[in-house]
Amino acid sequence: MTPAPIWFEGPPPPSRPPMAPERPALPPVEVVIDGEPAKVPAGATILEACRARGLEIPTLCFLETLTPVNVCRVCVVEVTGSRVLVPACSRRVEPGMTILTESERVRLSRRMVLELLASSVDLSTAPGVDRLMTRYGARPDRYGSPAAARGERDAREPGHHHAPDGAQAETVAQPVKIDNDLYLRDYSKCILCYKCVEACGVDAQNTFAIAVAGRGFDARISTEADVPLPDSACVYCGNCIGVCPTGALMFKSEHDMRRAGTWDEARQRTTDTICPYCGVGCTLSLHVQDNRIVKVTSPSDVSVTHGHLCIKGRFGFTFVESPPGEDQPER
């Protein structure tokens, strides 16, 4: 007699991906911030601890969705026992740490950093920098008037420098790079915060179309071998624009409106919606002026995008409106 076959039915698939077991919560860390005792979650950075207490620590190169690179040095604070000022964006709290966020040493360092930046970089479109300059009494003019632009920085011969005359401040002024219809690169406004490099790399897009080239004052953001953007690995996601703190990377539509004198953020309204192109469900923030979409961003606190988009979500909005100068169709 042939035995009946035994059929084995496996368990149903899980309704959600398996998650790692939760680790036990570590006890809070006791620190002193500006003379006030505080309990801070273990593993938190000094910046997180200060913001939780309502203390404003200025930052330029920091963004919650990117890996801290500690290059702008505006967020430095004084820690008792430390030989140097430490970056608040990446230094984690330790038991018994005593932190000073506005000591004279800290204020002097921040003032010097702001003066050096403003004397060599065009910060006219960097939001909030004017307020920081006033807050710390920065006077970039004491370094002299800006020196004349010396052409395309990528064309300079590495390692060859001319001694300054001491009367003028060397700048990073150079021609604006306009080689596509979506966005432009004005590196005369670049402070080398590395945010665009991080967003183009492992923190978001993994395209690696741009990197830092050069050394010292000749350091700048560049494509591989300084090829034009259309010939590079760029996929035009525009995530570099979304993280740029100074306007060095900008929508071409915004740039054209600024040159024409029609850009007015006071007249703009922002509306959140969902991208219509695919099923991922990315949140889009539409910036609208005079009933026209002038640029698109994405909130950094949304878990789907963390502020990042693709080329369609960031630039593919012109299909909803008629070309400039033409009447809107009747509805």
Image: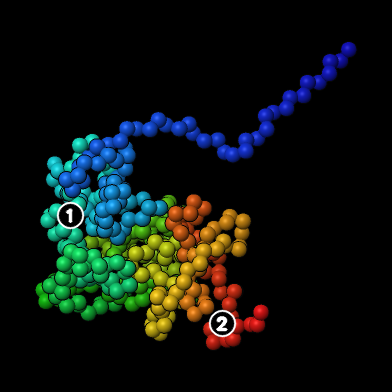
What residue appears at the point 12 percent right and 56 percent down from the top-left corner? 104
Visible residue check, residue 188: no
What residue appears at the point 54 percent right and 87 percent down from the top-left corner? 325
Residue 75, horizontal then vertical, whole percent: 24, 55
Q: In the figure, residue 60 lies in which quadrant?
A: bottom left
Q: Which mark is residue 323?
A: 2
Residue 247, horizontal then vertical, whole percent: 36, 70
Q: Does residue 131 appear left or right of residue 285 in this picture?
A: left
Q: Does residue 283 appear left or right of residue 197 in this picture?
A: right
Residue 270, horizontal then vertical, whole percent: 47, 68
Q: Which colour scheme is used?
A: rainbow
Q: Does residue 292 appear left or right of residue 121 in this picture?
A: right
Q: Does residue 18 appear left or right of residue 38 in this picture?
A: right
Q: What's the CA distance linking mark 2 and mark 1?
A: 51 Å
Q: Which mark is residue 81?
A: none
Q: Name the residue under label 1.
A: 102
Q: What residue type is labelled 2?
A: Pro
Q: Is mark 1 on a helix, strand or loop?
A: loop
